[in-house]
């Protein structure tokens, strides 16, 4: 397993690029609207992993609600797995609370599923399987 990316909630991706791109020196390799999750995503490779900047497309989206409650900051950690269905089955067997019992399409056409923070020490964990 690897850390696929670290998701960071921002009010506006364009504003946050002043730090992540312009000051720190990372490069934006992809930007995408994931409309079914109500979020705009920018990917910035960082070593073997990536920073995923998140901007809500509406206030009542998951990231919109997160920002209202907690403000900008680390939103989730994403772990890359080889077989997301097998991983979900194993977690379920172990009593893990899942947000997604079955994978859905995420940014970049990957299969993704979220694990509830109550099962991961308060961390929202995203599982990612690349094609
Ligand atoms: Co993510």
Image (cartoon, helix red, strand yellow):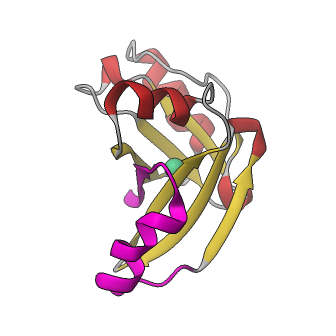
Segment colored magenta: 1-28
Occupied quadrant, residue 91: top left
Residue 72 in the image, given as x and y percentages of width and height: 35, 44
Q: Seen from this angle, which residue lies furthest top?
A: 95
Q: Quadrant of the C terminus?
A: bottom right
31 sits to left or right of 19: right
Q: Residue at x 42, y 65 (%)?
A: 16
Q: As rendered, which of 1 and 116 lies closer to the eye?
A: 116
Residue 92 in the image, given as x and y percentages of width and height: 48, 18
Residue 31 in the image, given as x and y percentages of width and height: 66, 68
64 sits to left or right of 95: right
Q: Residue at x 39, y 12 (%)?
A: 95
Indicate whether 26 appears above or below 77: below
Indicate whether 75 appears above or below 118: below
Please check the rendered image and state whether residue 7 is part of the magenta-colored stretch, yes or no: yes
99 sits to left or right of 18: right
Q: As rendered, which of 128 and 34 lies closer to the eye?
A: 34
Q: Seen from this angle, which residue lies furthest left?
A: 121
């Amino acid at each position: 397993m690897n850390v696929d990316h670290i998701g960071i909630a921002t009010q506006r991706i364009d504003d946050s690029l002043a730090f992540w791109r312009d000051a720190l020196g990372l490069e934006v390799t992809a930007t995408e609207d994931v409309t079914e999750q109500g979020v705009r995503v920018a990917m910035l490779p960082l070593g073997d992993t990536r920073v995923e900047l998140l901007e809500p497309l509406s206030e009542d989206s998951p990231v919109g609600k997160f920002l209202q409650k907690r403000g900008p900051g680390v939103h989730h950690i994403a772990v890359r797995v080889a077989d997301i269905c097998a991983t979900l089955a194993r977690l379920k067997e172990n009593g893990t609370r899942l947000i997604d019992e079955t994978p859905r399409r995420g940014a970049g056409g990957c299969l993704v599923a979220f694990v509830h923070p109550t099962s991961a020490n308060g961390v929202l964990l995203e599982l990612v399987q690349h094609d």
